[in-house]
Each structure stands twice: as structure tokens, then as C-alpha cells.
Amino acid sequence: MKHLLLASTVLLAISVSSSALAEPTSDASPTDPPKIPYATLTSGRALSTWFPETLTLLREAQALEKEGKTSEALDKYRDAWEIEPYTNTYAELGLAEARAGNLLACARNLQVALQAWTPHYPMVRPVELLREVLTYCKKDLGQIVIRINVPDVRVTIDGEDVREWPYFSEIYVEPGKHHIKAAKLGYWMNQTTVEVGSRERKPLSIAMQPKYETHFIGFSRPVNFSVNANLSTTGTKDGSPTWPTKLIIGSVIGIGLGVGGLVTGLVQASYAKSDEAAKPWIGVATASGVLLGLGVIGMGIGIASRPSPPAPNVIIQPSVSNDGAGVQLTGTIP
């Protein structure tokens, strides 16, 4: 009899262990959606949390949801969020998205609601419920961890603005390929495609490149301009008059001085502390403008009067540095 009892016990242990091995191991993440009750929108806390207009929209949303009009109900919840985009409204919208089966939208909204919550914040819903629902909604999602080298960048994923950015660097996404754009005024648009698996955390670094760079330099003292030119007094081999060439050279010098004086006068006048202090610099700018005009006229006369047509190749290049400026003349006058 004892042997029979021992044999029965061994067979029972073997059968139990075999059945345990045959069953799949359970996942730590919840497989069934949690029960999400509707909020009590007539409580004192609800009345003190939302504006009357927001409460009206939330009540209408609940009524539509109970009638099975899920799409219309979600539109009402989003309208309420537009009026009050705060923690409790994020929570109600996220819970409604979970009831509708929109797990990605649920995870993104509850992520914001829980991030803004503090122990002293008056919550209409138990925080434990929000955490439980978020755990369920994000269980099969992926995450893109975005890092950008400049602030205030607009980020879109698959053409949709990501309102969590830049408050959250970790953005929930559905598993698969996603097209990401980063845009900012004055920078080249950055576009990339990222493939994210279920429960994968994918880092993404985005380097924004500026289109241009502008520097404004203030002068603390008068700016000096220098002009160098080679004045030749020798005539040409064929006995042609040299005055047109001299006139061109003089006109080039006049143009250079005119440009330098005009820039200096305008810059210093703009930085003058009073109208009286600006008057001398306005005079300099006016005189330089006249000199510039005469230089242009003289160059035109000189070129028109030259017996041999080749036109002079002259480049006038003003340059500005931190503590001064200059005009560089380069070229050839045959």
C-alpha cells in the first residue's frame, strides 16, 4: 500500500511539472485592458478643476461615448483640451483614447499628465489608474529619443507635429519606419528615416546647420580708411594723351574715398548719442556721396576719351574689422 501511494505521488508530480512546462511563460506587461471608469464630473473637485465651458464639453463627450459615438466623443475631448491643456484634461483625453483602443495617443497624453503631476496637485483621477493604463498602452510601442543641437526646433513625425517635443525627448511611436523632419527659421531642414521595433528605445541625434550667419559690429572710435594707387606720369609709346588714364586713376581714388567716407559717416551717425553729435558725420557722409558721384562721372569721361578702348579692370572692395575698416583697390589699368 505504501508503494502504491508513493508511485501515485510521483506520477502526480510528473504530470504537474509536465503541464507547467507545456504552458507558455506569462509576460510581465498587462495583456488585458484595465477597466477605466468614467470620471465623476459633478464632484466638488471636478467643479473646482475645470472651467464651466470645459466641463460642458467633457460631459457631452461622456454622453457620446456611452452612446457608442466614439469618434465624435474624442473630438469633444480634444475640444476640451484646446481650452484647458492641463494635467487633468490630458488625463481624461488619454483615458478616452485608451477606451477607444488608440494606444499610441493614450500613451502620449498620459505621459504628459503624469510628468506634470506632483503629490500636491489636485487630481480628479487616481494617479495609480493613470500609471496602470499607461503601462498597458505603451507595452508594444517603441520610443525615439531625440537630441538636437539647437533649441526651438519644430519636429514632425510622419507629417504630424509632435507636441511633446521639446518637453519630452522620448517620443512614443508605433513599431516600424518613421520619417522625421526638424525645421527652424534660418537653418536647413533636417530629414531622416528611423526604424523602431516593439519596445525598442532608439536614440536619434539631429544636427541643425545654419543657412547664414550675420554679425553686427559697433565702432567705439572713428574708422580710418586707406586707399593705395599707382599714379604714373609717363605717356604711351604711340604718343597718345595720358590724361584719360590719369582721370580714371583719380576717379578710382575718388570712388574709393567716397565709399569709405560714406560708410564711415553713416555708421558713426547711427551710433551718435545726440543729433548734434551726428551732424558732423552726416556732413562727412554727404561730402563723400558727392565725391563718389564725381568719381563715377570722371571714370565715365576717362573711359570714353581714351584712344585705345581696352577698359580698365578695377575692383573696389571695402573691408571692415573689429576696430577699423579699409577700401582695397585691385585690378589693371592698361
Image (spheres, rainbow, N blue to C red):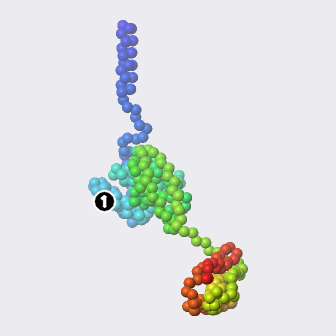
Question: Quadrant where the N terminus lies?
Answer: top left
Q: Which residue is painted at 50% across and 68% down in the image?
A: 185
Is residue 107 among the parts visible in the rendering? no
Task: Pinpoint residue 16: horizontal percent, then vertical percent.
Answer: 37, 22
Q: Residue furthest front?
A: 238
The picture quadrant where one finds residue 163 is bottom left
Q: Nearer the viewer, residue 101 or 318?
A: 318
Q: Which residue is painted at 30% across and 54% down in the image?
A: 66
Q: Nearer the viewer, residue 306 or 160?
A: 306
Task: Tell me if 115 is positioned left or right of 324 in this view.
Answer: left
Q: Which residue is painted at 41% across and 44% down in the image?
A: 198
Q: Nearer the viewer, residue 33 or 127?
A: 33
Question: Quadrant where the C terminus lies?
Answer: bottom right
Q: Is residue 20 above or below residue 153?
A: above
Q: Which residue is painted at 58% across and 90% down in the image?
A: 306
Give the number of marks. Answer: 1
The picture quadrant where one finds residue 72 is bottom left
Task: Pinpoint residue 269: horizontal percent, then vertical percent.
Answer: 65, 85
Task: Pinpoint residue 299: horizontal percent, then vertical percent.
Answer: 59, 89
Q: Amino acid at mark 1?
A: Glu
Q: Is residue 322 above or below residue 334?
A: above
Q: Nearer the viewer, residue 302 or 270?
A: 302
Task: Pinpoint residue 32: horizontal percent, then vertical percent.
Answer: 36, 42
Is residue 196 among the parts visible in the rendering? yes
Does dot 1 land on a helix, a strand or a loop?
helix
Residue wearing tag 1: 72
Q: Residue furthest right?
A: 221
Task: Tell me if 127 is positioned left or right of 231 in this view.
Answer: left
